[in-house]
Image: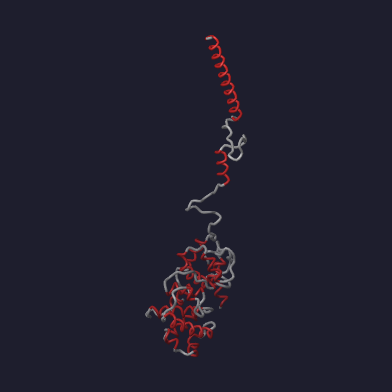
Amino acid sequence: MLTRTMKRATAAAKGAGGAAEKRAAGGGRARGAGVQDGCAPPCLSENAPGDSTAKPPQDRERRRRRRGLVIEYESDSIDPKTSRWEPQSWERQLENIREMRKNKDAPVDQMGANKCFDQDATPKVMRYQVLMSLLLSSQTKDQVTSAAMEKLRGHGLSPENMLHTDDKTLGELIYPVGFWKSKVKYIKQTTELIVRQYDGDIPDNVAELVKLPGIGPKMAHLIMDIAWNKVSGIGVDTHVHRIANRLKWVKKETKAPEETRVALESWLPRELWSEINWLLVGFGQQICLPVSPCCSDCLNQDICPSARRGTSKAKAQNKAQ
C-alpha cells in the first residue's frame, strides 16, 4: 500500500516538472521572438490587442516630439526674416554731411523757422509765430519767408492782431511768398481756430495741427520740434526728399515727401529725427542742389549711389550767374 502511494507521488512530481519545463521553454521562445537587434520586446497597442507590430511607448513619444518640433529664438537674437533694413554706408554718409554742415552757414541756419520768431515774445505768441513762419515757408525760399516774417513782427504778429488785420494789408505784408493769396486765407482761418478752440495757443499734437488750414505733416512735425520741443516725426521737405532718394536711404524710390518720411522713420534711429531735417536741408541748399549738384565738393562722392563726377560748387555758382 505504502509502495503504491510513493509511486503515485513520484509520477505527479515528474509531471509537474515536465509542465514547468514546457512553460519555461515556451516563454523563452516568446521572449526570443521579440529580441531583435537589441530591441525591447514588443508592446501591445491599446487600440489593437494582440498586435505584435506595435511600437514601444518611447518610440511613439519620440515620433510625436519630432513632428511637433518648434524652433524658438532667444529674446536678444535677431530673426533673419524680420531683421530691419538699413541703407549701405549710411552712418559714414551722415558723418560726412555733418562735417560739411559744421559751419552752419546755409540759408536755413540764418533764416529758418527756428530763427523767425520773436525771442522776447511770450511762449504762446512764440509758438504762434513758429507756426506762421512754417505756414509761409511752403514753396518759398528761406530768404523770402524771413523777410515776410520780419514785416509781420513789425506789424505785430499775435493771434489777436492778425484777426484785426484786413486781408489787403496782410497780403502786402507777406508778399511775395509763394501762393500768398491763399496764405492770407490760411492765416485768417487758422488764427480764428487757435483763438476759438485752443485759447490762443497752438495744438500740441500732430493730429490737431494738420487740421489747421495750410498745415501739412511736414510742417506739423517741425512745429512740434521747434515750438513744443517734442520729436513726433521727421519733417520731410523737398530737400530731404531729394537727398534721401539720391543716397538710397529709402528701400525703393519714393514719389512724395510723406512717403519718404515713412520710409526714413522705418530704420533711422529716433534720436536722429530732429537733426536730420536741419542737416539735409542745409546740405541740399549748398551742395546737393536740385540741378547740377556739386558732387566734386561732396565728401560722399565715392560712396553716393547717385554721384556725378566733375561738377563742383564753383561751377554750379558760375552756371547760376
Rendered residue at 51%/54% (across/down): 78
Residue at 47% x, 64% y is 270
Compared with 299, 211 (above or below) is: below
What colour scheme governs how the chains and residues are painted in the rendered image of this protein?
A: secondary structure
Expressed as whole percent of the image width and height from the top left, the position of residue 150 reads 44, 83
- Residue 63: where, in percent of width, then height? 58, 42
In this rendering, the answer to whether 17 lies above or below 310 is above
Residue 259 appears in which quarter of the rendering? bottom right
Identify the residue at the far front of this view: 1
Depth check, front residue: 17 or 147:
17
* Residue 102 placement, left or right of 255: left
Q: Residue at x 44, y 76 (%)?
A: 203
* In the depicted structure, whether residue 18 falls above or below residue 95: above
Residue 39, position in %: x, y?
Answer: 58, 32
User: How many numbered dots are placed on residues in this image?
Assistant: 0
Location of the C terminus (image quadrant):
bottom right
Q: 195 or 23: nearer the eye?
A: 23
| Closer-to-camera residue (292/37) | 37
Where residue 135 sits: x, y (%)? 49, 79
Q: Residue at x 58, y 23 (%)?
A: 23
Q: Nearer the viewer, residue 154 or 207?
A: 207
**Image-quadrant location for residue 87:** bottom right
